[in-house]
Image (spheres, rainbow, N blue to C red):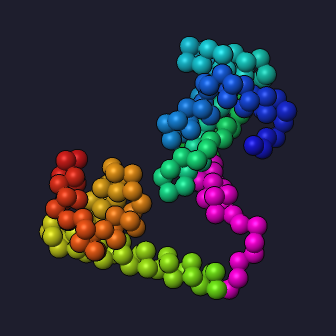
Amino acid sequence: MAVTEDQAAFLEFFQLQADEGPCVDAFREGRRIDVPDLEDSHDQWPQVAPYAVRQGYRSVHGLPLRVHRQTVGAVNLLLRRPGGLPRLDLEVAQALADVTAFALVNWSAEPLRPSDVSNRVQAALAAKAAVDMATGMLAESGDLSMAEARAALRGYADRYHQRLVDTAHSVVRRGLPAADILAVAREK
């Protein structure tokens, strides 16, 4: 945990102890929680909102930390004025939170060797090729555009909480029939 001031650290800790608050909800729900005025949130978070206001915070944004669409943590942006941040600032903050989460999850104390970089690039290219092949197979099977086929593939992976590349490999290896993915896409 990192904070910019002691009061924020206490508020973060208090949310965890009370098991309520914007940060806790952002983690549980995997989405951004915007609270433009904490004074209006006493019913939603009866312990945390009054405490936050007493500490001088008037608005807050809880941002999920996500890696491959999986929430691995959350962070609060606490403001001392009501109203919250502008939409564009929040979109940038969420993008930075996602990049930070990805970097933390993939961080290694050992420096990368040139062969490590090469291996990672090859793995990324192979994953892209599998997704592209599966997309083409779905487009052909379902008479879909490439964009529609990719959306169907992603929708299936999301629905069954699978990585996109794993779903693509199943299609390419013919372990997952295209008809199953197309059926899920038609349900939407």
Given residues 107 and 140, the one toward you in this image is 107
Residue 95: x %, y % from top left: 59, 54
Determine the residue positioned at 33% across, 49% down.
159
Q: Quadrant of residue 183?
A: bottom left
Q: Is residue 2 left or right of residue 107?
A: right
Vertical comparison of 71 with 156: above or below = above
Q: Magenta part of the protein: which range?
A: 91-114
Q: Quadrant of the N terminus?
A: top right
Whether residue 92 appears in this view of the structure is: no
What percent of the width, then of the height, locates residue 98? 59, 54
**Seen in the image, is 188 located left or right of residue 101?**
left
**Quadrant hosting residue 73:** top right
Determine the main secondary structure of the stretch shown in magenta.
helix
Residue closer to the observer: 68 or 162:
162
The reply, left or right, for residue 93 in relation to residue 128 is right
Tell me where residue 62 appears, x and y as whole percent.
61, 36
Residue in the foreground of this view, choosing between 87 and 15: 15
Give the mark count.
Answer: 0
- Residue 103 in the image: above or below residue 128: above
Residue at the farthest front position = 175
Using the rendered image of the protein, determine whether residue 153 is visible from the camera's viewpoint: yes
Residue at horizontal 69 percent and vertical 25 percent from the top? 17
Q: Position of residue 14 (x, y in %)?
A: 72, 25
Residue 109 on the magenta segment: yes
Residue located at (19% from left, 58% from top)? 180
Is 77 one of the magenta-colored residues? no
179 displayed left or right of 29: left
* Image point (56%, 13%), residue name: 43
